Amino acid sequence: MASMTGQLLVATPALKDPNFDRTVVLLVAHEPGGALGVVLNRATEVPVSDVLGDWSALARDPAVLFEGGPVQPDSAICLARMRQPVRRLKGFHQVLGAVGTIDLSVDPDRMRENVSGIRVFAGYSGWGAGQLEQEIEEGSWFVLDALPGDAFVDRPDDLWPMVLRRQGGMMAAVAHFPPDVSLN
């Protein structure tokens, strides 16, 4: 299977894991050994300034930590949107166009002129070799193209239906699936 780095995983109503109910995950890495992503639509109430004060000026609204996933919730992954696509910038790893991960050990002042905004995720979502592909085959995830702004929407709670609606057709109808209905 080709790399899905930079794609969105959108939870289907059939997905039973409560960690991923109605989530939108941006895959930041997908290799034969597994995949890693961050949940884009699970904002917490913890301000970025409480955890990473030096980076808080670059945080987009809502300027809070996000639950990136159930793996290593004490670690942080930072997504950044660059002002323009960057070929090489120390501390930045491109994921999709001008969006990528940024090394939080770098001085944020060095990044200020290149970065238009960041999102900080506590933890991440991870899959072992073949696990994600199996979940997709079982109907747990829709794999959809990401737009550069998906990781930085002002209203992250609206991202799941928004991404589904923009697909049109039957996929748009899934956006209206009631949250309390079981497919068992």
Image (cartoon, rainbow, N blue to C red):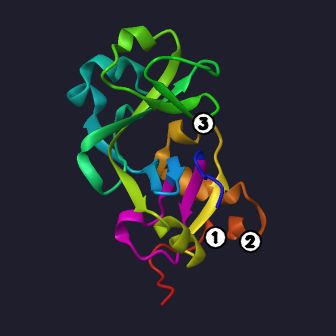
Give the percent coordinates (x, y) of residue 132: 50, 65
Q: Is 134 located above or below residue 68 in the figure?
A: below
Instruction: Identify residue type, mark 2.
Output: Met
Marks 1/2 in contact by CB < 8 Å: the verdict is yes
Q: Is 96 located above or below residue 179 in the figure?
A: above
Cα distance between the residues tagged 3 and 1: 22 Å
Q: Give the residue number, with chain letter if any, for mark 1.
A: 174
Q: Is residue 12 visible?
A: no
Q: Is residue 85 visible?
A: yes
User: Which of the 4 image quadrants contains residue 78?
Assistant: top left
Query: Farthest residue toward the bottom?
Result: 184
Q: How crowded is mark 2: few (under 14 residues within 10 Å), some or many (20 or more)?
A: few
Label 3 or label 1, whichever lies nearer to me, is: 3
Of the numbered discs in the image, which one, if any, rests on residue 107?
Answer: none
Give the percent coordinates (x, y) of residue 176: 61, 69
Name the residue located 42 percent from the left edge and 61 percent from the top edge: 127
Instruction: Identify residue type, mark 1.
Output: Val
Name the residue located 64 percent from the left edge and 32 percent from the top edge: 97
For label 1, the SS is helix
Q: Give the residue number, with chain letter if any, for mark 3.
A: 149
Magenta stretch encompasses residue 9: yes
Q: In which quarter of the image is the N terminus?
A: bottom right
Give the percent coordinates (x, y) of residue 177: 58, 73
Q: Give the residue number, with chain letter if any, for mark 2.
A: 170
Give the percent coordinates (x, y) of residue 79: 45, 34
Camera-nearest residue between 95 and 153: 95
Q: Give the range drawn in magenta.
A: 7-24
User: Which of the 4 image quadrants contains residue 94?
Assistant: top right
Name the residue located 45 percent from the left edge and 50 percent from the top edge: 37
Q: Is 93 located above or below residue 139 in the figure?
A: above
Instruction: Identify residue type, mark 3.
Output: Gly
